[in-house]
Amino acid sequence: MTLAADKIADESADLLAHLIRNACVNDGTPESGFESRSADVLAQYLGDTGLDLERYAAQPGRENLVARIEGSDPTAPTLLLMGHTDVVPVNPDGWRRDPFAGEIIDGEVWGRGAVDMLNLTATMAVAFRHLALSGFRPRGTLIYLAVADEENLGTWGAEHLLTRENEAVAADYVVTEAGGFQMPNAKGPRLPVIVGEKGSYWCRITVRGTPGHASQPFRTDNALVTAAEVVRRVAEYQPKARILDEWRRYVSELELAPELEAALVDPDRVLEAVRHLEPLGFARLAHACTHTTFSPNVVQGGSKINVIPDRIAIDVDVRALPGVAPLDVDAMLKEALGDMASRVEIEAPRGQEGSRTPFDTPLADALSRVTQALVPGSKIIPRLTGGGTDARYFRWKGVPSYGFALHSRRIPYTEYPLMFHGNNERVDTETLRLSATMWEALCRDFLA
Ligand SMILES: [Zn+2]
């Protein structure tokens, strides 16, 4: 690495370590997170740019930070780089390092948020500051946005800003987490860009029975026994597959055997094709990208070992393909339960719809140019994801929004899914350098 490259890596690692140490843990309660501490760190870091920094809080202690470099041409597009400052809770038992110490060990920054997504929140800020200090005067406006509360639906962050402070965050294009993990390929590394997310709905099915003495269970109406069959039917249920264009394009880039590729994009054959497919991680992804999925995860009920239970509640996590509405989910659950549907209560599904964004845009063209310069022979490819990000709030408004970053190959792309919300979250400093350099190059290319 050159001296300048070293400096970018060090500066990014240092800022990231600060954000990790702030431990802005969002446990879902309004008074958790306290992201204002990281808004302070970022404001201090960007302080010497001389730019006005704006802060917005929908909830005490949960500030969002906005910085902007105003463009010279009002007709040129505005690009918004968005990172969140909150992280999910940890169980330190499974970690080899202190999750909130922000240690830098052997070229890797360790801690909760290292890949979700304080790494990007930090490298976006580093690129933004370097652009500002270099006197970058683009045609289009550049906005840096650090949001709170992404890990609990964005109520106090992106959602609040887009509904109440739209002027501050109005943009034509958005980039946020995640993506850009290098996938080795015979034709050169493939770099996935997230262009769509599944919706997530939480559903509760309540099963009723008749209480009685457990010493005589014969011909009783035991709610738990009925619930077991409900769980079995929900877990087994497969709604008809739907092949989205994003999935078709993704599969076409993977250099798979032609028969397999054809089966993975055929709604009538994809389920059979993934049943015994290896590796397992790819089989799960292929299934999730082509189906609305149903996972029964929590059961509550029963009171005492000698009492036949009269009420069992089953919570089902439903991940719906974009375009699937709550009414559709309700209909699918009824189909899954068949003749049992009339014997249970299905609460109206609560949650949010998925989102999609076009891949053929000037921003994707710019991403393609800058990534090819940084990773020769690489190619960006569109991808869907099961997890939700704040990008959906922009996509729902029709703003093209991508999930992207640029990662080195030091940590294999197959390991990243395990680190999101998992144990031993960490990122290498070469990835930080690549991402920061990529953001800067993207802004210079796209906004010039
Ligand atoms: Zn995240």
Image: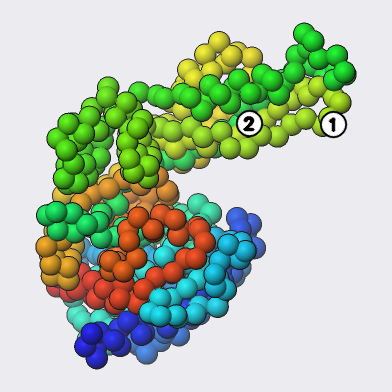
Q: Quadrant of residue 202?
A: top right
Q: Quadrant of residue 8?
A: bottom left
Q: Nearer the viewer, residue 234 or 256?
A: 256
Q: Amino acid at mark 1?
A: Lys
Residue 89 seen by the camera: yes
Residue corresponding to mark 2: 314
**Which percent across, then down, holds residue 356?**
30, 44
**Which percent across, then down, holds residue 43?**
44, 81
Which numbered disc flags the more N-terminal residue, 1 or 2?
A: 1
The residue positioned 25% from the left and 60% from the top of the image is 182
Q: Nearer the viewer, residue 84 or 407?
A: 407
The residue positioned 43% from the left and 76% from the top of the image is 109
**Which percent across, then down, holds residue 249?**
19, 42
Q: Quadrant of residue 6?
A: bottom left
**Alpha carbon distance from label 1 to label 2:** 18 Å
Residue corresponding to mark 1: 304
